[in-house]
Image: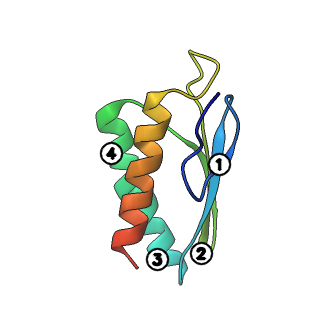
Amino acid sequence: MVTIPDGWSGDDKRIAKVFKFFAFAEALAFMVEVGLYCERVDHHPEWKNIYNRVWVELTTHDAGRVTEQDFALAAHMDAVFSRGR
């Protein structure tokens, strides 16, 4: 059984969260910073942005489930988001 991080939803296949910002520029800055991190660790989210919101789903496709890589990326996203608050 997977322990889903606080503020996230999901199951053993994927975890998800919606990040809400004050404006588009903040959402974009979040995606750029997280995107550069994703490139460094070679683990990429499924995500979309509409104005001040970023919808994120994390899963490790090769494993067919949520792995420690997803939890690490979720923690990084939460940290980046919290810094902007």
Is label 4 in a helix, a strand or a loop?
helix
Q: Residues within 10 Å of mark 1 (few under 14, many from 20)?
A: many
Hey, what amino acid is under mark 4? Tyr
Residue hosting label 3: 25
Question: What is the basis of the colouring in this image?
Answer: rainbow
Q: Distance between the residues labelled 4 and 1?
A: 18 Å
Is label 3 in a helix, a strand or a loop?
helix
Q: Do the residues labelled 4 and 3 touch (CB within 8 Å)?
A: no
Question: In the shown orientation, is residue 83 left or right of residue 24?
Answer: left
Residue hosting label 1: 16
Q: Which of marks 1 and 2 is in front?
A: 1
Residue hosting label 2: 52
Residue hosting label 4: 37
Is label 1 in a helix, a strand or a loop?
strand
Q: How far apart are marks 1 and 2 (CA)?
A: 17 Å
Dot placed on the residue nearer the N-terminal end, 4 or 2: 4
Q: Nearer the viewer, mark 4 or mark 3?
A: 4
Q: Are marks 3 and 2 in contact (CB under 8 Å)?
A: no
Residue drawn where x is 33% and y is 71% of the image: 83
**Residue 80 numbered tag:** none
